[in-house]
Amino acid sequence: MLDPLYQEERALRNVVLLRPIGLPDHAWEMNDSNSWHFIALDGNKLVGCVVLFPSASKKSSAQLMQMAIANNYQGKGIGKQMVLKLLQFAKEQGLKEITCHSRKNVNGFYEKLGFTVYGNDFEEVGIPHSHMRLVLN
Ligand SMILES: CC(C)(COP(=O)(O)OP(=O)(O)OC[C@H]1O[C@@H](n2cnc3c(N)ncnc32)[C@H](O)[C@@H]1OP(=O)(O)O)[C@@H](O)C(=O)NCCC(=O)NCCS
């Protein structure tokens, strides 16, 4: 049986990430079983999630993916706290680099956390994205 918190995480991603861009529910779960999952709780309610997917080709690198904060919890600093925790965890794992495919309209969020854009922008799931990365030291 799937953990109830994982079910809530999947539901949050449907609402915040997938439905607004017309993708079917549960459309982006292919890396879930091989990723570290981070969640934010308000009491028992799951209000934020993000995963960290280790790179298969580059042992010191991992990709931040599926970052979502519940609509009525956005803009309160929860996303920032989650990424800071994720970065701390990544350091403890000995990782040296975190990458992400940032939706271009939220590049500023990642930039404030120390990520920088590299390479060419590209389209994914029908919307413009930037490659971003942060070197851990
Ligand atoms: C983008 C998202 C994860 C940010 O999380 P959040 O909890 O709303 O953001 P925070 O309140 O922690 O913001 C932290 C900082 O980033 C800034 N910020 C947040 N969203 C931003 C955006 N879209 N563009 C630029 N800056 C942004 C905030 O102003 C804040 O700045 P400060 O530290 O100077 O006060 C969240 O709004 C969200 O889930 N959005 C919809 C889904 C999405 O786009 N996910 C990312 C896919 S790549």
Image (spheres, rainbow, N blue to C red):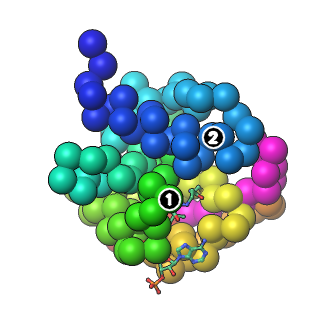
Q: Nearer the viewer, residue 90 or 13?
A: 13
Element type where label 2 sits in the image: helix
The span shown in magenta is 122-133
Quarter of the image that includes the C terminus: bottom left
Whichever of labels 2 and 1 marks the residue nearer the N terminus, that label is 2
* Image mark for residue 114: none
Whole-angstrom CA distance, mark 2 to mark 1, is 13 Å
- Apparent side of residue 70 relative to residue 78 in the rendered image (left or right): right
Q: Amino acid at mark 1?
A: Asn
Residue visible at 38% across and 74% down? 77
Frontmost residue, 105 versus 133: 105
Q: Which residue is mark 1?
A: 71
Vertical placement of residue 6 versus 36, above or below:
above
Crowd class of label 1 (few under 14; some 14 to 19; many from 20; radius 10 Å):
few
| Residue under numbered circle 2 | 18
In magenta stretch: residue 126: yes
Visible in this render: residue 42? yes
Q: Amino acid at mark 2?
A: Leu
Is the C-beta of the residue carrying label 1 under 8 Å from the nearest atom of ligand 1? Answer: yes
Residue at 27% from the left image edge and 47% from the top image edge: 45
Looking at the image, which is closer to me, 71 or 127? Answer: 71
Q: Is mark 2 within 8 Å of ligand 1?
A: no
Q: How many marks?
A: 2
Q: Position of residue 110 (x, y in %)?
A: 53, 70
111 to 22, vertically: above or below: below
Q: Are marks 2 and 1 in contact (CB under 8 Å)?
A: no
Across and down, in percent, residue 31 comes to 49, 29
